[in-house]
Structure formats: C-alpha cells, structure tokens
Amino acid sequence: GQNIDQPTEMTATEGAIVQINCTYQTSGFNGLFWYQQHAGEAPTFLSYNVLDGLEEKGRFSSFLSRSKGYSYLLLKELQMKDSASYLCAVRDANSGYALNFGKGTSLLVTP
Amino acid sequence: SAVISQKPSRDICQRGTSLTIQCQVDSQVTMMFWYRQQPGQSLTLIATANQGSEATYESGFVIDKFPISRPNLTFSTLTVSNMSPEDSSIYLCSVEEDRGGEQYFGPGTRLTVT
C-alpha cells in the first residue's frame, strides 16, 4: 500500500509564490504526478517526475527526491485562477501502473 | 496529448437501475483506467481496463457491480450496476498513451442516484 500526505489547505496572496509539499511511501515507485482540479471539473495534468530534480513548466515547477519520498509543487506569480485543489499522485509499478492519489491540497489565492 | 470524451456528462438515476458510461479517445492508447471521486474526496481507482481481457479490479470493487469492457485501444465502458445512493459520484476515465508515461483524465461523468 501507499501513504501519500499533503497539506489539506493553504492560502497565499496574488503575485506571491507557494510551495505545496507531498510525501509518500511506496514499494515500486514509477513516477509522481501533480494535477490541478477546479471545483466541478476533472483533474488537469500539471507535471510528472520520475527522476530526482526539478522540472519547470512556466509558472509551475515540480521537484522530486526519491530517496526522501518527497515532492513539491511550486507555483510562482500566483493568479486568482490558481485557486483550486492540487492533487499529488504516485504510480506504483507493483500495482499495475495506476495512480494512487493523496487527499489533495485546497489552495486559496487572495487579492 | 490524447483527447478524451465521456458520455454521458451527467445523469440522475433511480435506485436499482444500471448506467453505462462510455470513454472514447481520439488515438490508440496503451493503458485505460477508471476512477471514482466521491463528493469532497480524492480519486480512487476502480479498475484497469485491459484490451481484450477482463479488467483488473482494485480491492473493494467487483466485476458484478462495475463490469468494464475494452474492445479496442480507443474505447472503454464502465457500467454501474444495481445502483444505490452511495454510488453517487463522479466517474472518470484516464489514459496513458505509452505505458509508464503521462496520464490524462477525461471530463468525467457526474452520477446522482435517487
């Protein structure tokens, strides 16, 4: 089984930077995913890390340390539309390559 | 990335009936999965849809309740059988174009059982 932990809620100010952490335990790590989900909508793919290090995509970056079982999603230049739930998910090769999700972090961006 | 559509987008069904949800992809994909998201919760995997063979179900989900078909590399169906109000949820299909690659979600089917 897997334990995936991320904060329940976070609040940040428009224009600022926020870091959402995720820790996990898994036996057959095969990648870590971050998704954004607005209320009433399906999850939207943000990033995928399989090797250690930082992946940057515009305002969003994701970091992975496999030895520490740790990842973070970094959002820069926050905009009001970034208010959403952010889901951390781990793929386990021992579980058929499907994703196991954390409970999600609800981010509120304030003016 | 692949374009994924689901039908229906939403439905309201009576207790005891069944609903079949379709997932269509615009290109051939290696892996297809079905997830459930109950109100206020995160996503839970129901099963992996295997092309040409029986689906692989997660603990707590059984074929009699959630039969799945995957006749080819672009299409899958999930049936929610003998529904009860506890089945009210969003049902999502997801795909991986290549095994071990990025995974994308369809728009979801919002099911309400009365």
Image (cartoon, grey):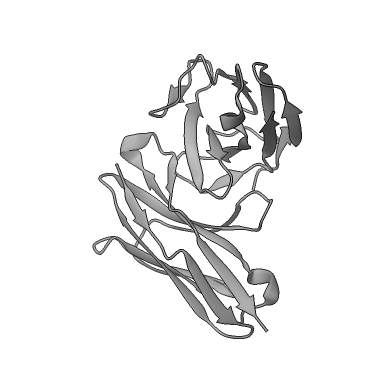
| Side (left or right) of B91 relative to B10 | left
Residue drawn at x 60%, y 16% is B82
Instruction: In the rendered view, tell whether residue B93 sits above or below residue A18.
Output: above
Q: Position of residue B110 (x, y in %)?
A: 69, 38
Instruction: In the rendered view, tell whether residue B64 sits above or below residue B107.
Output: above
Of A10 and A88, nearer the camera is A10
Residue drawn at x 42%, y 66% is A7
Q: How many marks?
A: 0
Instruction: In the rendered view, tell whether residue B92 sits above or below residue A14.
Output: above
Of A21 and A61, nearer the camera is A21
Visible in this render: residue A75? Answer: no
Visible in this render: residue A16? Answer: yes
Residue drawn at x 72%, y 37% is B5
Q: Picture quarter containing residue B13?
A: top right
| Side (left or right) of A84 relative to A4 | right
| Side (left or right) of B87 relative to A23 | right
Q: Quadrant of the N terminus of chain A?
A: top left
Q: Picture quarter containing residue B38?
A: top right
Q: Quadrant of the C terminus of chain A?
A: bottom right
Q: Position of residue B18 (x, y in %)?
A: 66, 18
Q: Position of residue B97 (x, y in %)?
A: 56, 40
Q: Position of residue B27 (x, y in %)?
A: 67, 35
